[in-house]
Image (tube, rainbow, N blue to C red):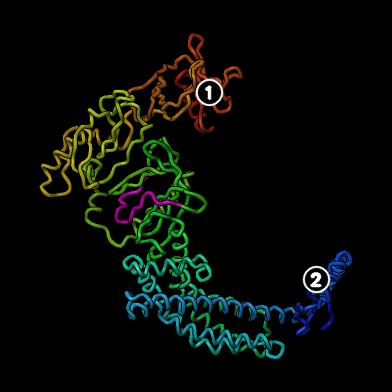
């Protein structure tokens, strides 16, 4: 003992001792002793005096603690490099022991607590119990022995400051980990299968995972990952330890040999470790998603490989929605965002259902791309072009990684849009993309409602979509438009049991259906098009689908409309920057001015669009315009 600091608090007497095990290791020990109290009355009477003494003791202790801190810092500065290395080696040994304690707790949870609970389930056979717990008994015995040896060594560290001989003694048993990792996937699959088929087993798992003192809010399958992660931890600690060990130190040969054996065991298990790291990531992600079904619950998707996840925009029938998408090798999850890291799956697309991923020209959403499946097809929007390419590449991996592709899937890719009619779910045109029937061009009202054709995805009135046809992708009868009804009727008569019908069997309207399904009917080659906010004179601004066709600016209520709302021949107009009295943003807007007409104001979403439209409008208004 080199120094002591005394302080009295209430009925206890504390002595802080500064102890030295050897010159490079400093630690603190606090000893508590009872202070006898003669009489409660005396304590009460002397309360003011004790309070005063308490303050004095506090001030003295604060000063002493500050002096002690400075003393320790000075001591560390005066230590040699070898003393610092000795101190670091001891800390590594302590960390090795501390993590070993935690590891044994997890092994005890699995080997003892979990095993006892599962064995109590009368529905689980002894063979199944052995498949689940593998060689956990042997691992528990091995590491209990290692923990005890490390404890004895640390307690007597100033005499035997070595760990190499202990680690070398257990190195030959690292083959147990190779066996464990080889059987791990099957064990987790067994747990997952029992959870979905055995109610008693599922209740046992749920009860155990709900006990925070045991599972600490983790799944059983996540605890089973601990043995897999233990070998790399040994390698990391031994590599750190040997860096601070002189080559002539007595412990060096044993540490070097132990490190070689540990590294060899870790290298053999690298592939399994990578798979299990992926499993841990997938488990963590899926634990935050509800509504994904029993096949992926409880972290049971062992064969699932993570590819990408993140926020994205989804174009729905009525509005643009914020969604969160998870892309795995076997499934794509489109989720609603419920809170911080909490999601609810709204669409689950398996790799076998996914047919095609391609760019889209849909203007209602930024950087769009289509996901085509047998059951549902839709458009997503990315943040920028790079983000779109990244998502399409990730989804492309889902298509390329699936083990096999059905003959039907191959034919669907080779077939044209009209030939796929009724076999693959179409992308629905959004309600806000059209204001009139796409056949008779009658405007929709509160009485004349919108109806989507289930075959081509376009929007019609009730009169133009009054037919019913069987749709293969939906496996039921659905509403179809006049054109699709003609195609599907011909196809059902001519296919003779085959899935597809030839182009010769289709009526003339088929090509128009295919054209309108893929592209908008109002756009011609060379037209400039965009959604713009248009203000005419003093009227309220409105959003229109604007098309500059030659020298005429055409305004549509929706980008799929065929009949325009307004037209403006702009020959002779001036394209100007708005004035302050025009009450529009001069930075994002342009003014179309003619001295005999009401002015039009066009507001853009970005500078690039504004510059492009400025040039084209000027050319249309003045054929001699020079950029």
Inter-mark Cα distance, 2 to 1: 79 Å
Q: Is residue 566 magenta?
A: no
User: Residue 275 location, x and y as percent?
Assistant: 43, 69
Q: Which mark is residue 9?
A: 2
| Residue depicted at 40% across the width and 70% down the height | 204
| Residue depicted at 35% across the width and 72% down the height | 190
Give left or right: position of 60 versus 166.
right
| Quarter-of-image position of residue 429 | top left
Give left or right: position of 172 versus 191.
right
Residue where numbered disc 1 is placed: 590
User: Residue 499 location, x and y as percent?
Assistant: 17, 49
Report the span colored magenta: 343-358
The quarter of the rendered structure image containing the N terminus is bottom right
| Residue depicted at 39% across the width and 53% down the height | 333
| Quarter-of-image position of residue 314 | top left
Count of numbered circles on the image: 2
Comparing 483 with 453, the one in front is: 453
């Amino acid at each position: 003992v080199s120094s002591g600091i005394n302080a009295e608090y209430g009925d206890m007497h504390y002595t802080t001792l500064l102890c030295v095990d050897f010159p490079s290791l400093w630690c603190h020990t606090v000893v508590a002793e009872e202070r006898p109290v003669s009489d409660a009355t005396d304590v009460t009477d002397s309360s003011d005096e004790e309070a005063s003494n308490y303050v004095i003791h506090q001030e003295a202790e604060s000063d002493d603690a500050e002096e002690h801190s400075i003393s320790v810092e000075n001591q560390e500065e005066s230590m040699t490099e070898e003393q610092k290395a000795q101190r670091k080696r001891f800390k590594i040994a302590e960390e090795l022991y501390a993590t070993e304690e935690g590891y044994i707790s997890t092994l005890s949870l699995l080997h003892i607590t979990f095993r006892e609970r599962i064995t109590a389930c009368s529905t689980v056979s002894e063979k199944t119990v052995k498949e689940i717990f593998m060689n956990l008994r042997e691992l528990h015995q091995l590491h209990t022995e290692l923990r005890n040896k490390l404890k004895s060594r640390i307690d007597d560290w100033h005499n035997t400051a070595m760990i190499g001989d202990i680690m070398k003694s257990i190195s030959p048993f690292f083959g147990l980990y190779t066996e464990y990792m080889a059987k791990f996937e099957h064990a987790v699959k067994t747990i997952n299968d029992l959870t979905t088929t055995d109610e008693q087993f599922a209740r046992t798992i749920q009860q155990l995972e709900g006990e925070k003192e045991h599972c600490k809010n983790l799944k059983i399958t996540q605890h089973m990952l601990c043995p897999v992660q233990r070998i790399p931890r040994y390698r990391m600690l031994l590599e750190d330890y040997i860096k601070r060990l002189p080559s002539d130190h007595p412990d060096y040969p044993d540490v070097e040999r132990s490190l070689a054996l540990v590294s060899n065991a870790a290298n053999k298990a690298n592939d399994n470790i990578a798979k299990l790291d992926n499993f841990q990531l997938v488990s963590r992600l899926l634990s935050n998603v509800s509504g994904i079904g029993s096949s992926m619950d409880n972290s049971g998707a062992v064969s699932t490989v993570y590819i990408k996840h993140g926020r994205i925009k989804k174009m729905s029938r009525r509005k643009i929605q914020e969604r969160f998408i998870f892309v795995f090798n076997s499934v794509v999850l489109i989720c609603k965002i419920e809170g911080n890291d909490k999601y609810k799956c709204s669409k689950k697309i398996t790799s076998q259902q996914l047919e095609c991923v391609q760019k889209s020209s849909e203007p209602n959403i930024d950087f769009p791309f289509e996901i085509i499946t047998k059951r549902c097809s839709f458009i997503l929007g990315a943040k920028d072009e790079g983000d779109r390419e990244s998502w399409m590449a990730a989804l492309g991996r889902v298509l390329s990684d699936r083990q096999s592709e059905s003959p039907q899937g191959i034919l669907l890719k080779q077939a044209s849009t009209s030939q796929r009619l009724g076999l693959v779910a179409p992308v629905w045109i959004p309600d806000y993309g059209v204001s009139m029937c796409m056949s008779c061009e009658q405007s929709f009202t509160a009485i004349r409602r919108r109806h989507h054709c289930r075959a081509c995805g376009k929007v019609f009135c009730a009169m133009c979509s009054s037919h019913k046809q069987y749709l293969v992708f939906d496996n039921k009868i659905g509403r179809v438009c006049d054109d699709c009804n003609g195609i599907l009727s011909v196809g059902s008569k001519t296919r003779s049991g085959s899935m597809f019908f030839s182009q010769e069997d289709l009526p003339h309207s088929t090509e128009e259906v295919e054209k309108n399904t893929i592209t908008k009917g109002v756009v011609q080659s060379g037209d400039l098009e965009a959604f713009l906010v248009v203000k005419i004179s003093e009227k309220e601004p409105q959003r229109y689908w604007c098309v500059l066709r030659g020298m005429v600016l055409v305004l549509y209520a929706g980008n799929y409309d065929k009949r325009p709302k307004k037209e403006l021949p702009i020959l002779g107009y001036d394209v100007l920057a708005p004035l302050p009295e025009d009450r529009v943003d001069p930075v994002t807007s342009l003014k179309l001015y003619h001295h005999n007409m009401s002015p039009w104001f066009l507001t853009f979403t970005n500078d690039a669009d504004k510059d492009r439209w400025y040039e084209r409008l000027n050319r249309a208004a003045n054929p001699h315009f020079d950029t």
